[in-house]
Image: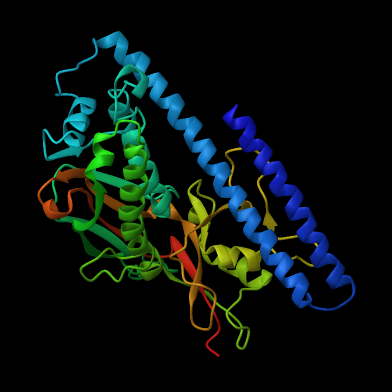
Amino acid sequence: MTLAMAQMLLEKRKNIETQAHALLDAAEAEKRDLSAEEGVQFEKMSADMDGLRKRHDQMVQFETDNKSAEDALRKSMGDKPEVRDGSDVEGQLRQLLGGEIRSMDLQGTKDELRVLSGATPAAGGATVPTTFYGQLIEHLIESATMLSAGATVLTTSSGEPIVLPVTTSHGAAAATAAGAAIGGTDPTFAQRTLNSYKFAQLVQVPKELVDDTGVDLEGYLARACGRNVGNALGAKLITGTGTNEPTGIFTSSTLGKTGATGAVGVPTFDELIDLFYSVTGPYRSSKSAGWLIKDTTAGQIRKLKDTSGRYLWEAAVVAGQPDLILSKPVYTDPYVPATGLGAKSVAFGDLSAYFVRMINGVRFERSDDFAFGSDVVTFRAIVRGDGVLADQTGAVKHYVGGAS
């Protein structure tokens, strides 16, 4: 049922895209730009398309999570009886929300943890639903696009620095005459250290809500904590400087194409093709290759056509599939810079070459004393991580708007 609804959203989105194309085609036929009214109409259509896409993605993720949880539950029930002594994740979460314990670590895979939280409010499981941990991680991933866009994620149990070898040049061969010394250049390497930068958020909840088992406290906490730490980490995985924070993918990628002078930084059809082919063949054809842009940039690229009048943007028509540019998936992130003069606004390449380090998953803790005078309970979520592009020879390249 959920996937069927997701498919309906895609079909509705496709209809809006058809209307948007008709608006652009009419203006082009009359050899004019969109009027002010038409511009507002097109922007609304673009926003509607983005909203429908996000709702579709959430539904597909929900269906995937549910199936994984059911499979893990069946497997778990066949291996051992349910535990209710507080040593499992559900017991710990109940003790945390009830004030019996003050902290816990949520580690391991999402499915393994979710299967241990089986009670429902109707069955007396008042404050922790089966999907609590899944929601916490889901909202983190939803906010940190690089975690869901194909980046390679390394999970460690401790936070000591990890030295990662980085390729900066593959070297080159050279033509050599018979009997002459063999030439060519050596590959060059560098080292980058993956650290454990902390991203955290406090959430304060009235004690009455904690005590009231009819309130969806866990859903609120999952949204607030997951999104807040996800936003904090996700922003740095895109544009972090690498100084006391992750090195963002736009920071460590290399230049692939510079836009034309005086074009206000918006890429043209030909410039996106140039960016595409600036990435070497193996990376360009990789299953992990994709585009990374901002939502507003997506609205601009949707207007681009080739010389035959075909639109560059290929909207998805099958539930669970991404939109495409030149047959490669498109990922949008709010922290990607907007188009502009000198701005790195589009990245393309093998996104699996970007390494994200996560330490222990998510830590979730409670304090009844922090705001004792206000009678509120304080919860905090903490995640530690880092990121860097491992192959800097051109696995991922970016587009920069013209300088003036």
**Residue 397 x/y as whole percent:** 47, 66
Q: Foreground: 198 or 48? A: 48
Q: Residue at x 61, y 73 (%)?
A: 267
Is residue 365 rendered to the left or right of residue 168?
left
How many tags in the picture?
Answer: 0
User: For residue 219, which quarter of the picture?
Assistant: top left
Q: Which residue is drawn at 71% across and 70% down?
A: 40
Q: Can residue 236 be seen in this view?
A: yes
Name the image colouring: rainbow
**Residue 262 x/y as whole percent:** 62, 88
Q: Foreground: 145 or 53? A: 53
User: For residue 366, which quarter of the picture?
Assistant: top left
Residue farthest along the bottom direction in this orientation: 404
Q: Foreground: 246 or 376? A: 376
Q: Can residue 304 be seen in this view?
A: no
Q: Which residue is drawn at 16% across and 42% down?
A: 157
**Residue 126 x/y as whole percent:** 29, 27
User: For residue 128, which quarter of the picture?
Assistant: top left
| Quadrant housing the N terminus | top right
Q: Foreground: 161 or 238? A: 238
Considering only vertical position in the picture, is 1 above or below 318?
above
Considering only vertical position in the picture, is 351 above or below 208?
below
**Residue 29 x/y as whole percent:** 89, 71
Considering only vertical position in the picture, is 19 above or below 62?
below
